[in-house]
Image: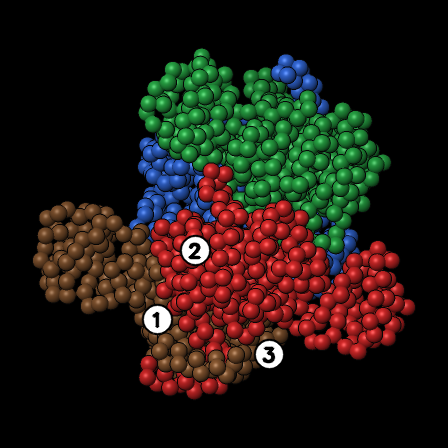
Chain colours: A brown, B red, C green, D blue
Amino acid sequence: MIVRLSPSAPATTLDALLHSAAAAGLEGRPMPDGRGGMLVGVDGALTNDVLDLPGIAAVHLTHKPYMMASREHRAPSVVRVGDVEIGSDRPVLMAGPCVVEGRAELLEAARAVRAAGADILRGGAFKPRTSPYAFQGLGIEGLRLLAEAREATGMPVVTEVMEPDQVDIVAQYADMLQVGSRNMANFPLLRRVGATNRPVLLKRGFAATVEEWLMSAEYILASGNSDVVLCERGVRGFDPILRFTLDLNAVPLAKELTHLPVIVDPSHGTGRRSLVEPMALAGLAAGADGLIVEVHQTPDRAKCDANQTVTPAVLARIHRKGLALRAALRDDVDVAAHVERTLVVAD
Amino acid sequence: MIVRLSPSAPATTLDALLHSAAAAGLEGRPMPDGRGGMLVGVDGALTNDVLDLPGIAAVHLTHKPYMMASREHRAPSVVRVGDVEIGSDRPVLMAGPCVVEGRAELLEAARAVRAAGADILRGGAFKPRTSPYAFQGLGIEGLRLLAEAREATGMPVVTEVMEPDQVDIVAQYADMLQVGSRNMANFPLLRRVGATNRPVLLKRGFAATVEEWLMSAEYILASGNSDVVLCERGVRGFDPILRFTLDLNAVPLAKELTHLPVIVDPSHGTGRRSLVEPMALAGLAAGADGLIVEVHQTPDRAKCDANQTVTPAVLARIHRKGLALRAALRDDVDVAAHVERTLVVAD
Amino acid sequence: MIVRLSPSAPATTLDALLHSAAAAGLEGRPMPDGRGGMLVGVDGALTNDVLDLPGIAAVHLTHKPYMMASREHRAPSVVRVGDVEIGSDRPVLMAGPCVVEGRAELLEAARAVRAAGADILRGGAFKPRTSPYAFQGLGIEGLRLLAEAREATGMPVVTEVMEPDQVDIVAQYADMLQVGSRNMANFPLLRRVGATNRPVLLKRGFAATVEEWLMSAEYILASGNSDVVLCERGVRGFDPILRFTLDLNAVPLAKELTHLPVIVDPSHGTGRRSLVEPMALAGLAAGADGLIVEVHQTPDRAKCDANQTVTPAVLARIHRKGLALRAALRDDVDVAAHVERTLVVAD
Amino acid sequence: MIVRLSPSAPATTLDALLHSAAAAGLEGRPMPDGRGGMLVGVDGALTNDVLDLPGIAAVHLTHKPYMMASREHRAPSVVRVGDVEIGSDRPVLMAGPCVVEGRAELLEAARAVRAAGADILRGGAFKPRTSPYAFQGLGIEGLRLLAEAREATGMPVVTEVMEPDQVDIVAQYADMLQVGSRNMANFPLLRRVGATNRPVLLKRGFAATVEEWLMSAEYILASGNSDVVLCERGVRGFDPILRFTLDLNAVPLAKELTHLPVIVDPSHGTGRRSLVEPMALAGLAAGADGLIVEVHQTPDRAKCDANQTVTPAVLARIHRKGLALRAALRDDVDVAAHVERTLVVAD
């Protein structure tokens, strides 16, 4: 049951609704509707007398199981990371090395991606590795270097957190907490990042349905943190030519089902350097609110994910083309004229 | 083995190579390299004395198993259907109803998609249906109506052929022969369409690897028909929310591996009307040479595939936005200035 | 609508039902229910007056779309190939080389698999190959050799047919027609084998759902041929370590949904020699009515599918263990005592 | 590099090897080879002088990346849970409710599965649920009830642990720690259970390759815990008719690649009650060392997983048939005679 309160509803109505839900043993969750009013999601049915309170504009009996993440009755959300807005009209670019390798390397990389147009710096301090014998990241030292790179470039920082006990220390250094694909259904971790005040980048599990992904977002939202950004990063497919199959269908589909912003990771999503640029552009054309890209000065020397890492020059081209593409789609009238003009020349 | 002949190689060299291959029991295939020279693919190794002939520019010992479809040593191909070029700079739009339903409906649909920007008319006369009891198309009557619609609109016509014995009659009416996803590995059918002089639209099998798809194209090319266009139309995925998962990774990947043009079918590829437009645009951003879209005046009354069919108005928007998008990507300098201008306004 | 006729129903009732269906433009299909009565499937609804005829025992308004293949109201079917019954209590063993390589090789292989317990000889004369340049089988000469091997060993022969125009010639030589995985949805071919009086082995498409597989069987049944055996042969999975993923779930599931017999192909189903024996036994434990296994005297020299081919000795072990396993499952009481005895010894 | 020590190698050799590995910055892991000798796995190459030590029987330069889990140079392992041996000749049966619902229900269920032949009691105290609003288990109270059920029936207990901080408390009550499918790549959790002295049941991630699964086992082994049992529990497939696709290929494949025992979960693996029995038997025929089955007195009233839960009567039949099947496969000679006898009667 979702109860809509009018903007003028008295505070006592909200209190009474939450109280009634609790008394009935139900979960009740207040949430802004993004249009000035409030919604109260209730995981069950309240009695009619409660629903007679002043300021109740509507009662919807059925809704998606991810009642807080659902687009129903909601405007799209904008999530703010430092000064950067994700979900507004302008697509956001996150970029940086797979893993923080050292101070000099990171600072150089950060400056390079900044110059290429990046808004947010990515980099792994704690790395989930398939092999227990592989390099697992610099840990807290990596977090410190990320913070230093933020000071040097002005970009906010996103980095992965792998277990509940790491959340506090990562949240101390990072501006945004990343939950990786392998942890999308790590429910204790979701609850724990949901209890912080840091925005969360929730990657889709590589074999998760879109609705399971939204249920994982719901864990974070239901724990009190409303700043969740979804990230499509490739699913497991049957063709061994690619490490993963970037599923761009998930972008318009998720945006149809949820009010949360959605970005795309063409690096992990394909595992192949030559596909990063075209799939990044395709993600933006499909409606993504941004990209996250693995970048290294000399990709072949990257300590991990070398095959899917691009240079700062490629990032700059993605940035420039991405903005052009979105401007063309957004600004139909102006561009239409422009197109006519260029087509006359081209054809 | 691939042998490159210089543009000035004498005709006797080509003859001698093919003769030597045949004498050795090997398949030998001449093919233009798209840059003025010739290549001869040989499915095995010729002896050194043959390779000493005048005009042989280079000999490549290893190559992809799809030697005629491979991009190695080749320029991208352009396939001509009537007056329409597929694979040139301008993306091509194929559109029309899933199935030819009747004369009046088809003519109306053809005029509507033409007005919306379509270059080629699609429509099913022979329909593969999962159920033996479902409507299987109008057959030859459908072919006649398609030909009439071509006369009325000037658009060439593409339609599916399902079995070897139908190839002649379909080729008599249609400008392009479509091999459907379920028939991608129907090798007798591939050989048969390869023996015609009609261009072929080869849909990817919905569980075929990209290299299997290219091997199927190779069957057509090796049978003597060099006019093959590939079409990504969605693969089978694990999320039941979509009928198919449009695999846009296949677009830049195929274009990296083959010289053949590649188009995208966002209708079958998603099975969901709301995804057709964003995935069509994403396909163009990923580098597709065109689109094929199911369109009906009143999609909910379409005799098949209603859930994935869009209106002519949506097609017109795809056309307009698609051209704008490609112009933006192509014309970096001009658009860059334009983008700066619109971004100043928008942000 | 499915109409059940009692065993004593007059012939005029069946005639009247079929006539009424035809008059209403509906498909009407008579079928034995396997228990002495008849069913009439109608792809739509007949009027009540027709349903008042003498001898009509019941009318079922809803049913599966594969009304002839469905298990609803039917006893399991037994399909006879020569003297061999498929679907009876005793599992059937089909075995032989991937492809007919020559006279001596085939006769030796046929005698070896016969000695190892095979009931039916398999072998490819027309082979679907991914590459147009690969060996495509001996064709009609292969059919003649198969017929000769039948004479020599007494085993009936199953072999693949790839296109409608081949059906007559293959049916002339073979006892059972195989429709391969890549042709499961080749509807013209299904109709054509449905018009013969030869039993058909219908392999599951490697990305077909179980219900799509049954719809393909329905094409054959609806064309007049009631002797269809289903074969699970592996689906496409995400783990590149195996060529295919044998989906044994499909065995009990299909047997729950259809009256048709179901066998298992552990050779194509895994693509890995070491897995053929355990997966063959697992298939029988899951309830399969038989197996089809690729066997070669010297598997590493087989002209195709070498990696998944086993020796006659392995086949003999599969046969012996398979019978023991099924006897143990069938004969609960006897074996229970036996088990107690052997367990006392073993533990 | 894997170094084999002969049974008579002096302890100083082992010490020296481990010391040299550490000095070189390499991981060195001693492991019994299951045949009386020792192996030392080194994640890199030691110098030749070290490899000249007395008692070194062989040096293998290349090996699988999961060097401790690998079958190379090892005998199969037996893992002991209480008095129950997993990996010996007799298949082990784990059974119980999806989730501990209450004291009376659990004790009744435990006695029922014990009477039906179960060796180990399963039951969830901490439950991973897709929805944050679903029942999440009784937690520590559930652990206490499981311990009580162990006292009442004599069966050891296996239950899931979801996060590192829960490991100590779960290990205090349970005899075996289960790592669920969604946590297969939760590396901090794997390290943490690897630091206990409790055997671990490691479920395969539902989209994990077999080698990724073994790498996850390697995390536990490399953390010092050698008692790992693998469990195949179904992977994500493309056919929506089943919740998951039980991948029995993984059983013989894993047993070929690792010395660890492998069991099968036909309940989660299919999600369909009617498939539990045939797929359980198929799992045993494929070579599984045991089964884990969800059982409830009245499955339709189970608080979770009702659709895949069977009654104690079905469990008893699985037990009886499973033993008969394995006896038949094991005891070839005796059963062969018996089979002949029963076949004479049956046919």
Tell me the SS state at disc 3.
loop
Chain letter of mark 2 equals B
Q: Quadrant of the C terminus of chain C?
A: top right
Single out the residue that lies furthest toward the right: B49
Q: Quadrant of the N terminus of chain C?
A: top left
Image position of A93 with respect to D201: above or below: below
Chain letter of mark 1 equals A
Q: Along the polypeptide, which appears first: circle 1 or circle 3?
A: 1
Tell me the SS state at disc 2.
helix
Q: Percent from the top left, x then y, of residue D11? A: 70, 54
Mark 1 = which residue? A87
Do the residues marked 2 and 1 share a common chain?
no
The residue at the point 71 percent across, 36 percent down is C169
Mark 2 = which residue? B106
Specify the amino acid type for callout 1: Gly
Relative to C302, D172 lies left or right: left
Chain letter of mark 3 equals A
Towards the viewer: D204 or C43: C43
Mark 2 against mark 1, which lies toward the viewer? 2
Q: Percent from the top left, x then y, of residue D2? A: 71, 56
Image position of D210 with respect to A232: above or below: above
Specify the amino acid type for callout 2: Leu
Image position of A168 with respect to A190: above or below: below
Mark 3 = which residue? A298
Towards the viewer: D157 or A90: A90
Specify the amino acid type for callout 3: Thr
Tell me the SS state at disc 1.
loop
Mark 1 and mark 3: Cα distance apart in space: 31 Å
Q: Percent from the top left, x then y, of residue A160? A: 45, 67
